[in-house]
Amino acid sequence: MTLYPELTDEKRRELLNSMVLIRTYEEAILREYHADKSPGFDIGAGLIPGEMHLAAGQEPVAAGLGAHLTKDDAMTATHRPHHVAIAKGVRLREMTAEIFGRETGLGRGRGGHMHLFDPETHFSCSGIVAEGLPPALGQAMAFRRGGGDRIAVAVAGEGAANAGAFHESLNLAALWKLPVVFVIEDNDWGISVPRAQSTSVTSNADRGAAYGIPGVRVEENSVEGVYEACGEAVARARAGNGPSLVEVHTLRLWGHFEGDAQGYRTDLEGVPGRDPLPTYKQALVDSGAITEEDYNVMTASASERVEDAIDFAKASPTPDPADALDYVFSEGARS
Amino acid sequence: MSTNIDPARQESAGNAPASAASTGAPVTGAGVSTATDAETTAGGDAIDTGTGRAPGSSATVIEPEPGKRKLSTAKAIQEAIAQEMRADDSVFVMGEDVGPYGGIFSSTTGLIDEFGADRILDTPISESAFIGAGIGAAVEGMRPIVELMFVDFFGVCMDQIYNHMAKIHFESGGNVQVPMVLMTAVGGGYSDGAQHSQALWGTFAHLPGMKVVVPSNPYDAKGLMTAAIRSNDPVVFMFHKGVMGLGWMKKNKRSIGAVPEESYEVPIGKARVVREGTDVTVVTLSLSVHHALDVAEKLEPEGISVEVLDLRSLVPLDRDAIVASVSKTGRLIVVDEDYQSFGLSGEVIASVAERQPQLLSHVSRVCMPDVPVPYASQLEYAVLPTATRIEAAVREAVAK
């Protein structure tokens, strides 16, 4: 685990704390998701129904990127959105209530875990690969027109780099010099297809060159490496110097979605040893940045926040079926 | 937050009585009674195109008298955009060839001269990127007008349109609005072949979350564009090339008509009786309105009285106006340049069949059959809903 000398211990604790909160959250959702789906697994059953894509192992991307963003910046994310949403500062209670399909949720139970919209933090996500990139361009256009140094960040998986919307978006953002940062989470797998079988280049960061923008690949799943790379990209966008592309070689610690037995996954045995969270924690203990006691306080505090959000969701009302046709339009109704 | 499904809100846009659906002279005169429309609008709480308007805008004018000044449909659209851009800094235009070229079908001619390249943006041929950018800008409070050059090109960017533009408001539980206009050219009749001649409005209307408007004449085009820009919902604005009044294409005689100079709205979701009649109702839209009017004029001396209803909007669909007209004539012909099966024509007939089946003594359709639009003119005109086909359908209807 590479540590970057210029980071203060305080910043390191912040980054670790963010990773701990995300992991605690994903473990809690995992627990709740499976709690009432056994003995037979029924994807549509239980308090959290539907597909569930969890981001354990990808905390370094979220924490390292989120540390550079403010509430006023925009972020678009993917079908696997919890970690970056948390790092962006999305309201945990309302996000959790949405995942539980409750009326108090971010989308009043209309969106679900792949469709989280938080106007307060300008966060959104989309379940369609690569299609979160184009809206980020428009958010960046609006920010630039409004003056100031707000930026838009589009997060996508490595599979998105093979989709048309990715290339159209990089070209347009570069052409118009938009304040955008594109972040690719390369977790090696497009569901069951390994990256080598889907992608013609070894680094998607190289694709930045095709559009005349900087492209950086962070090879180690290290929060400090992400922090440094994203820091430069964010600063460049804020300064009005245009978009950048950052790819992080990260880790999908669990399945593509819950219920995925991962029989296709040849690297499964080595996965636990690559978990970035204990590695980073140990590095900080070894460096003297934190003590074991500090870490225990961190995890306890994260648990408290996460369980509060889950309690809030569970105590919230489910939507009234009589309202099922609401919110198609803001004005009038479909006839 | 609504606590119940309000039955009135599930009805057509104007939940005023069907009898209040506006009536008027043929579109040549655009003679719509202002008083009637004011009442209709006041009674229809589903129509509220003015909310969320930028501060400082003047009171909304709804369907004023047309006056004497005449414009082509293309110029009427340009004028609507220009007036809204002057009134509201957040309005801008983006698309392929919308700048110095002025739009391939002249929807944006001259705008770049007044507003500059910062607000009239020529884009690369990257429809997913720039339509998506329109969505993102709208989410952050802008009011983009994004042109998709031909509706036929939706195949390369439909995800942004139907999975994002149309669903964000719903998925966010009403917390995020997408006040965007997607403007696009539709229709055939000039041998542009199967990939540049389609109507396709039924496809957009089928998918929830987009309002869909299809003006047939300059007056409605200006008013509907103004209403679309001011709407806080995404609106797909579909203009037929044959009603734009272009110098390089066979012009419909009603593609130039009287248009008020002032800014005004035609309410989204309200059909209009463009010719009153008693024997048969022709429900139609876009260029086909003019073919229907031509047929109605031709048959009048024979004592055949044809009522022509111009839908103007598909979403919301003014089902009240359809039922009101058919309740008068008892015979329904739907004329639709879109493909016949699984589309608008069936929906119009279902609107009557579900509500007042006893009204229907005759139903027929004059549509694009389920075939790609052919290139050779002889073949294309064999499948288009021409005046000849409409006349035959009317004669058949009244013969019963």
Image (cartoon, coloured by chain):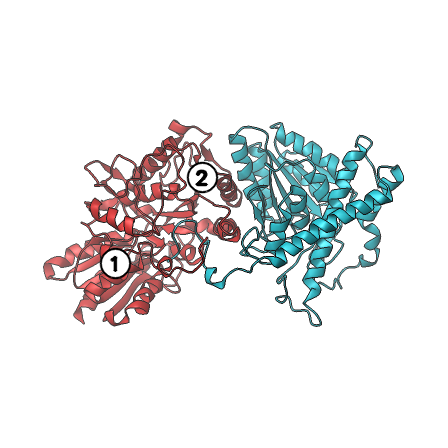
- Return the mark for residue B144: 2
Residue depth check, mark 1 versus mark 2: number of the one nearer the observer: 1
Looking at the rendered structure, the secondary structure element under dot 2 is: strand
Tell me, what hue is chain B? Answer: red
Cα distance, mark 1 to mark 2?
Answer: 34 Å
Report helix, strand or loop for mark 1.
Answer: helix
Give chain A's shade: cyan
Q: Is residue A48 left or right of residue B331?
A: right
Is the C-beta separation of discs 1 and 2 under 8 Å?
no
Q: Quadrant of the C terminus of chain B?
A: bottom left
Dot 2: chain letter? B
- Counting residues from the N terminus, which is met first, the one under dot 1 or under dot 2? 1
**Residue for badge 1:** B18
Relative to residue A52, is residue B153 drawn left or right?
left
Query: In the rendered structure, which amino acid carries the disc numbered 2?
Result: Pro
Residue A183 drawn at (x, y percent)? 67, 42
Q: Are marks 1 and 2 on the same chain?
A: yes
Q: Residue at x 22, y 57 (%)?
A: B19
What mark, if any, has residue A52 been given in the picture? none
Subunit that carries the residue with mark 1: B
Q: What x and y, as percent, mark residue A252?
A: 74, 53
Type of the residue with mark 1: Ala
In terms of depth relative to the viewer, which is nearer, A84 or A213? A84
| Camera sees residue B350 | yes
Q: Residues within 10 Å of mark 2 (few under 14, many from 20)?
A: many
Front residue (pair B352, A329)? A329
Name the residue: 82% across, 45% down.
A295
Q: Quadrant of residue B147?
A: top left
Q: Position of residue B269 (x, y in %)?
A: 33, 52
Q: Is residue A192 visible?
A: no
Mark 1: give few (<14), some (14-19) or many (20+) Cα within 10 Å.
some
